[in-house]
Amino acid sequence: MTQPSERFIGKSVIVTGGASGIGQSAAELFAAEGAQVVVADVQSAAGQAVVAGIRSRGGQAIFVQTDVSDEDAVRRLAERAVEAFGGVDVLFSNAGIGISKTATETTSAEWDRLLAINLKGAFLCSKAVIPLMRQRGGGAIVINASANGVLAEPALAAYCASKGGLIALTRSLALDYARDNIRVNCINAGYIDTPINSEYFAAPGAREAAGKLHPLGRIGQPEEVARAVLFLASADASFITGAALAVDGGLTAAIVGPG
């Protein structure tokens, strides 16, 4: 493991879906590199535990319970970031859910809920923080899209639709706010060892089968994706905006058969 740098000293960072998985790893890495981190999630106990862990290691963090599909809740999240840390420099829009159903199996309520969290949530969070970033002279937004925004899989109709929408939203935001020195990028992860995939990986042989789909021969770990998020959010990526970065072990580069 490389030694932490100080790329985010003095920076205020919001991480949605920060109570577990990629969001948790990103929150911890941001804090380790000096950021003041706002961990946002619907899961209060888990989110508070992430914050407690960050503080125990000398980092700065607060938890704000947030449903990203609720505009008032997102507005309060932004306000709490300003109250605690003076503004917002970075948003990692990571909160999301999945539904394993075809279009005909998916109810309208399920469709609406998934799109509200995955796609509308990223829109609302971006809408709330962009004025705050303008006040700071710029900022960076990283959105957690997916390889499923580029390549579909069976029985993931709503999920794939939401992730494709996030890639398009990323490009639109990048164009609209480039003159404000606000960079917007997204990450397209492959199969990652996170809670959202835990039920799938619980099936016998599922983890190994998923690993074989990736040219690197394995599934990814949350920290591997989080490190890509930090790169895109940092000055190291100062000339990158509107990009969809594949963090997928080569999944979208080629078709790989089992064995």
Image (cartoon, helix red, strand yellow):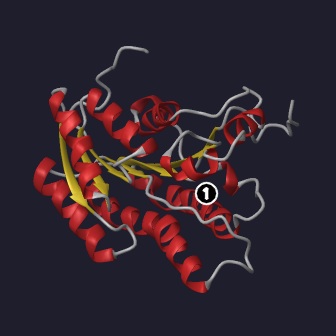
* Residue displayed at 70% across by 42% down: 206
In the displayed orientation, state which residue is furthest to the bottom.
108
The x, y position of residue 8, in whole percent, is 29, 32
Amino acid type for the residue under numbered disc 1: Ile
Task: Examine the rendered structure and indicate whether residue 243 appears above or below residue 113.
Answer: above
Task: Examine the rendered structure and indicate whether residue 233 appears above or below residue 67.
Answer: above
The x, y position of residue 54, in whole percent, is 22, 34
The x, y position of residue 109, in whole percent, is 54, 83
In the displayed orientation, state which residue is furthest to the left.
83
Callout 1 environment at 10 Å: few (<14), some (14 to 19), or many (20+)?
many
Is the N terminus in the top left, top right, bottom left or bottom right quadrant? Answer: top left
* Residue displayed at 49% across by 52% down: 143
Task: Examine the rendered structure and indicate whether residue 189 appears above or below residue 178.
Answer: above
Circle 1 is placed at which residue position?
A: 167
In this picture, residue 259 sits left or right of residue 191: right
Q: Identify the secondary structure beneath mark 1.
A: helix
Q: Nearer the viewer, residue 106 or 241?
A: 106
In this picture, residue 147 sits left or right of residue 14: right
